[in-house]
Amino acid sequence: MTTPDPALPDFADVLGAAARIAPHAHATPVLQSRALDAEAGAALRFKAEQLQRAGAFKFRGACNAVFALDDAHAARGVVTHSSGNHGAALALAARLRGIPCHVVVPENAVRAKLAAIAHYGAQLHPCAATIQAREAACARVQADTGGTVVHPYTDPRVIAGQGTAALELLTAHPDLDALVVPLGGGGLAAGTALAMRALAPECELFLAEPAGAADGARSFAQGRLDHDFVPDTVCDGLRGTLGAINFSLLRAAHAQVLTVEDADTVAAMRLLWTRTKQLVEPSSAIALAAVLAHRDRFAGRRVGIVLSGGNVDLDALATLLAPAA
Ligand SMILES: Cc1ncc(COP(=O)(O)O)c(C=O)c1O
């Protein structure tokens, strides 16, 4: 028997997170569509996190991290770097707790997401769009403020919080054969793995990743983290690199990566809007795109899909959905 690593979150942390965030987060609905079931040849159950507060599952992890702080740490505020959804989620959670929030944002971040972070009252700190620049700026702001860094996907409190979406989905639908979630840094995926191991150990975990940011697929293929890539994808939430703690939890869960072309993701986004009237962002539509691009893996099965967020840049929407010339 192996001894659990105390630094890794476990299912008890997911349950703790669920209780902690319950007064603040929405228990989002699970949607179904006959048209999309027919399209996929499978029974699809969509966990609608685009209807979560701040428009993405990210609020779950951020809220758990903020409300887990003791008063002395909380008073100094929280700090993070984020291209968008985590920043907005942390800003909202900090506002609910009444504490300061600082968000380091890359110059190429989606405008609508920057506006949301500012709207929730956080202070923005722009920096160059590399992961190194983001981490350096974050360390600087942390040193200046004495705040607590809440990493968007490697923080165990964040991972446990993200796991509450699958906890709700599997509690309502314990009979799923497969669960598909988008993969960026792996916070959502790792939290999902914790909930699955406890509630649906037979259910298979699939990670949908853009072909233009496929560090996850390469890392799984090689059995070690491979961060050597320059992201090129419309999925702005999935450009981060897979975290070490996340990789470790996902390997233990025997997760499988499915890479998806951007064109398929945009087609899935269009399909979701047309058939279910749900406007989701590309980083979210990729999970349905993965199912449709790999139909034979899912045919005849009950498949959970986490629709992870709905923060679409409306100014860029027409260009994104325009048919290729
Ligand atoms: C909408 C959306 N989906 C999925 C992800 C990926 O989450 P993670 O980094 O936890 O893998 C993000 C990350 O920003 C996101 O914003």
Image (cartoon, helix red, strand yellow):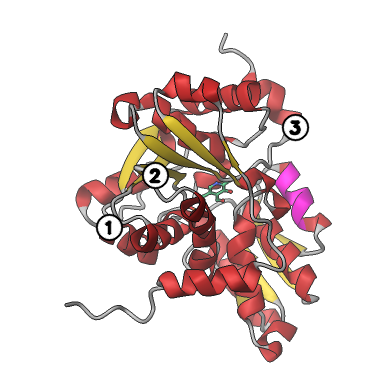
Q: Left or right? Give the position of 135 relative to 186.
A: right
**Amino acid under label 1?**
Arg
Q: Which residue is mark 3?
A: 314
The residue located at (68%, 56%) in the rendering is: 26
> Residue 320 or 169: which is nearer the viewer?
169
The answer to whether the beta carbon of the residue marked 1 is less than 8 Å from any atom of ligand 1 is no
Q: Which residue is mark 2?
A: 176
Up-down relation of residue 302 to residue 271 (above or below): below
Residue 298 percent coordinates (x, y): 33, 31
Q: CA distance from mark 1 to mark 2?
A: 20 Å
Up-down relation of residue 166 to residue 50 (above or below): below
In what element is the residue under mark 2? Answer: loop
Q: Specify the quadrant that holds the N terminus.
A: bottom left
In what element is the residue under mark 1? Answer: helix
Per the rendering, the mark at residue 251 is 1
Neighbour tally class for label 1: few under 14, some 14-19, many 20 plus, Cα within 10 Å = some
Contact between marks 2 and 3 (CB within 8 A): the answer is: no
**Amino acid under label 3?**
Leu
Contact between marks 1 and 2 (CB within 8 A): the answer is: no
